[in-house]
Image (spheres, rainbow, N blue to C red):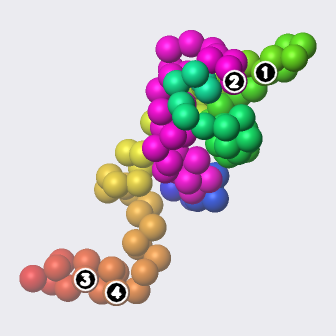
């Protein structure tokens, strides 16, 4: 997992760790939407929605495209593919496990091998 950017992953998870933002992601999974379409489903101010969208965009979870007065939002499929590729690496045993770098883990393995 040496090639994993924990900083990027944490940023994505932080962006997804809010109920409103998860609802927005769910809405965008159906289709590209403008802010007015998203606002219609919430009891939020325009500025609060902009705050949530900025977090999602900055984390790379959502794409935005300006078209005249409107901004269209869509899911960033590359980010979700990244998440789906990384999640199994976080919990499955692997040849180059990060715990091999931790002294007490190596000792436990050595003691188990002797038993």
- Crowding around mark 1 (Cα neighbors within 10 Å: few <14, some 14 to 19, many 20+) is some
In the image, residue 14 lies at what x, y percent? 56, 53
> Helix or strand or loop: what does disc 4 sit on?
helix
Does the rendering let one see residue 55?
Answer: yes
Q: Which residue is nearer to you in this view: 58 or 89?
A: 58
> Helix or strand or loop: what does disc 3 sit on?
helix
Marks 1/2 in contact by CB < 8 Å: the verdict is yes
Compute the Cα span from label 1 to label 3.
Answer: 55 Å
Instruction: Name the N-terminal-most of marks 3 and 2.
Output: 2
Instruction: Name the N-terminal-most of marks 4 and 1.
Output: 1
In the image, residue 73 lies at what x, y percent? 68, 23
Does the rendering let one see residue 83?
Answer: no
Give the magenta part as a residue range: 9-37
In the image, residue 68 lies at what x, y percent? 90, 13
The residue lying at 43 percent from left, 81 percent from top is 102
Q: Nearer the viewer, mark 3 or mark 2?
A: 2
Marks 4/3 in contact by CB < 8 Å: the verdict is yes
Q: Which residue is mark 2?
A: 35
Q: Nearer the viewer, mark 1 or mark 3?
A: 1
In the image, residue 63 lies at what x, y percent? 71, 28
Compute the Cα span from label 4 to label 3.
Answer: 6 Å
- Crowding around mark 4 (Cα neighbors within 10 Å: few <14, some 14 to 19, many 20+) is few
Instruction: Name the N-terminal-most of marks 1 and 2.
Output: 2
Which label was assigned to residue 108?
3
Main SS, magenta region, reads helix
The residue lying at 49 percent from left, 50 percent from top is 17
- Crowding around mark 2 (Cα neighbors within 10 Å: few <14, some 14 to 19, many 20+) is some
Instruction: Name the N-terminal-most of marks 1 and 3.
Output: 1
Q: Which residue is mark 4?
A: 104
């Amino acid at each position: 997992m040496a090639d994993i950017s924990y900083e990027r992953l944490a940023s994505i998870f932080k962006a997804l760790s809010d109920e409103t933002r998860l609802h927005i992601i769910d809405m965008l999974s159906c289709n590209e939407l403008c802010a007015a379409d998203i606002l219609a489903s919430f009891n939020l101010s325009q500025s609060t929605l902009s705050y949530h969208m900025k977090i999602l965009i900055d984390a790379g979870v959502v794409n935005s495209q300006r078209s005249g007065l409107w901004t269209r939002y869509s899911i960033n499929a590359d980010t979700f593919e990244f998440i789906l590729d990384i999640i199994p690496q976080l919990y499955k045993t692997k040849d180059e496990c990060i715990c091999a770098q931790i002294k007490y883990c190596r000792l436990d393995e050595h003691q188990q091998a002797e038993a």
